[in-house]
């Protein structure tokens, strides 16, 4: 019996130290393009080259019906879903920010006061708020931490959440340079310092963002100078866009904001990604590594100019070329035959309401400001429970969540559940609101509807508010008068590309129902590592070369 036990232990030890088979991929690359709607790849197809998006679509598996199934389509939740294969009801990332009722303070999705930034003096950042595990976490665990996970982006939440909790490193842009936090390392690697000091980031000052295509190719998008477009950081509404920020005589913080709102923000990230791939020695041994890259400039441009603008057409075409160059570099360094690549987006975007109204003035479309929504809630509750001598009924409106002021409720000697019920009923009568669900409804069972189910996936009992709401289609929650945003449960905010390419992937276009939540479990199946904890996505078997 002792000999059998000893033999079993020795076998287990061999299984632990033997590296993956030679046919296993050396590198998995997850590419997320912030605010890339699926229809851009269709609408702008004639302007795309053969070596970027179309290369992956023609030689990989492309899903034309990939949508997020949650109610809050924004950057933090989207990247968390891609990484974990689960929604906020499991991974806890309900929005970019939320309100902590116990601590009575706002929480940013990757904030962490226990760590400090390395390379900047801003508040610390880490994946501490992410619940469960990601594909990268399981890859590291399955290889006994021989596999490396590196994640890069302009946005901190994109890099951090996509990399997961066990990533070797995450780098993002803050102020005027790429940084990390003490969660990952005590100091920046020398190669990052050299990149920051190279002058590349500052070299775009005074340059102009010009059209990359002939001017007549943009005519289909309508006029370039539209009054409902924003003018971020001195870029103006029309081509060419000067990249100087608010002060054309010198570099200020507004220059870096302007730079991030041009295609050159993506180019800088791509240059940084190339350095990371080489310097971190990804894909060089028998243990597969994970490289996460999230391009953010598309989101900045989309917010300012909208999905029907000359600028969005231009940055999509330029992103296609940046992607082609990046794929060429990966081919040179690792070999695409040794890689699996997954490309997707974290969310889409709504059309600018005024753009819709300029073509169809009778359309039910518009903006809802936070102040108007707060006023409606206060008035509705005061009609039922009496006017307040001071303060208000609402503590915070964050994302799609409304948090009651519990002190006000106690002072009125009311039951919170009764107040919430009245408020939800009142919101359902608001002409710009499509749905409102209480905590009790979201934690229990209620008559099914597609919006309610999506809202439920974005609800976490320890973090979400007392009510979740959704606006009617073509309405946006926005305090301004120009530009647009996202965050609602509709297809224009949820429908994104999903493309898989590489060893074990069968090429083809699929119209089957899919989601970015399916990426992590599919990669787990391909690599033979454990599924992320709490995963809700499925394995995209139709894209796999099964025996």
Image (tube, helix red, strand yellow):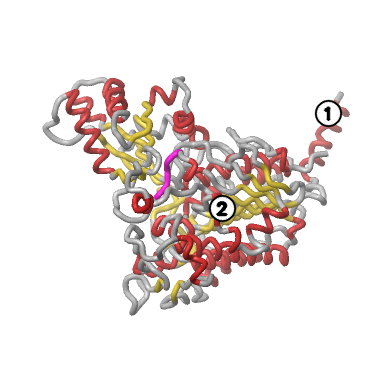
Depth order, front residue of 30/197:
30
Q: Is residue 110 visible?
A: yes
Residue 394 drawn at (x, y percent): 25, 35
Residue 486 falls inside the magenta stretch: yes
Please give left or right for residue 48 compared with residue 421 in the image.
right
Image check: 143 left or right of 21?
left
Q: Mark 2 and mark 1: span between their CA atoms?
A: 47 Å
Q: Position of residue 536 (x, y in %)?
A: 59, 33
Front residue of 364 and 185: 364
Q: Which residues are magenta?
A: 485-489
Q: Which x, y percent locates residue 61?
A: 69, 48
Q: Residues within 10 Å of mark 2 (few under 14, many from 20)?
A: many
Report x, y in % for residue 391: 17, 36
Foreground pick, 330 / 12: 330
Queried whether the magenta region covers residue 122, the answer comes back as: no
Task: Report the residue marked by disc 2.
Answer: 32
Q: Residue at (52%, 36%) from the top-left corner? A: 69
Q: Which residue is located at x 28 percent, y 43 percent?
A: 370
- Kindly state the secondary structure of the residue where label 1 is placed: helix
Residue identifier under label 1 = 5
Give the secondary structure at mark 2: strand
């Amino acid at each position: 019996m002792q000999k059998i036990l000893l033999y079993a232990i020795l076998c287990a030890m061999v299984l632990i130290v033997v590296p993956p088979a030679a046919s296993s991929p050396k590198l998995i690359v997850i590419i997320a393009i912030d605010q890339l709607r699926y229809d851009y790849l269709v609408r702008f197809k004639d302007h795309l080259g053969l070596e970027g998006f179309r290369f992956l679509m023609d030689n990989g598996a492309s899903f034309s019906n990939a949508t997020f199934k949650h109610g809050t389509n924004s950057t933090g939740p989207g990247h968390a879903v891609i990484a974990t294969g689960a929604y906020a009801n499991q991974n806890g990332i309900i929005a970019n920010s939320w309100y902590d009722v116990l601590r009575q303070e706002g929480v940013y999705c990757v904030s962490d006061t226990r760590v400090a930034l390395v390379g900047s003096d801003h508040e610390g950042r880490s994946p501490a708020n992410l619940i469960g595990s990601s594909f990268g976490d399981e890859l590291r665990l399955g290889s006994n931490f021989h596999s490396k996970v590196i994640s890069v982006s302009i946005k901190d939440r994109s890099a951090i959440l996509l990399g997961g909790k066990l990533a070797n490193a995450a780098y993002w842009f803050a102020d005027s340079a790429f940084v990390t936090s003490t969660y990952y390392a005590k100091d920046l690697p020398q190669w990052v310092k050299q990149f920051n000091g190279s002058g590349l980031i500052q070299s775009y000052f005074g340059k102009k963002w010009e059209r990359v295509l002939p001017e007549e190719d943009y005519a289909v998008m309508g006029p370039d100078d539209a009054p409902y477009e924003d003018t971020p950081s001195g870029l103006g509404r029309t081509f060419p866009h000067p990249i100087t920020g608010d002060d054309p005589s010198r570099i200020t913080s507004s220059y870096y904001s302007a730079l991030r709102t041009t295609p050159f923000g993506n180019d800088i990230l791509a240059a940084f990604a190339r350095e990371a791939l080489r310097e971190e020695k990804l894909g060089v041994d028998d243990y597969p590594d994970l490289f996460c890259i999230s391009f953010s400039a598309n989101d900045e441009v989309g917010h300012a100019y909208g999905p029907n603008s000359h600028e969005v057409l231009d940055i999509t075409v330029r992103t296609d070329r940046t992607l082609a160059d990046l794929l060429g570099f990966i081919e040179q360094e690792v070999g695409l035959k040794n890689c699996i690549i997954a490309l997707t987006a974290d969310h889409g975007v709504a059309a600018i309401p005024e753009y819709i109204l300029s073509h169809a003035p009778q359309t039910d479309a518009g903006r809802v400001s936070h102040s108007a929504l707060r006023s409606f809630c206060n008035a509705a509750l005061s009609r039922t429970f009496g006017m307040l001598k001071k303060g208000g009924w609402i503590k915070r409106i964050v994302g799609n969540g409304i948090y009651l002021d519990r002190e006000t409720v106690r002072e009125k000697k009311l039951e919170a559940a009764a107040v919430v019920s009245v408020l939800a009923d009142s919101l359902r009568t608001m002409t710009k609101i499509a749905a409102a669900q209480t905590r009790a409804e979201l934690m229990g069972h209620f008559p099914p509807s597609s919006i309610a189910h999506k809202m439920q996936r974005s609800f976490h009992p320890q973090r979400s508010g007392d009510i979740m709401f959704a606006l009617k289609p073509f309405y946006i929650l926005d305090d301004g008068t120009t530009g647009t945003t996202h965050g609602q449960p509709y297809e224009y905010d949820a429908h994104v590309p999903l493309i898989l390419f590489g060893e074990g992937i069968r090429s083809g276009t699929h119209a089957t129902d899919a989601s970015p939540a399916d990426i992590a479990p599919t990669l787990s199946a391909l690599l033979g590592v454990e599924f992320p904890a709490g995963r809700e996505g499925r394995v995209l078997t139709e894209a796999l070369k099964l025996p």
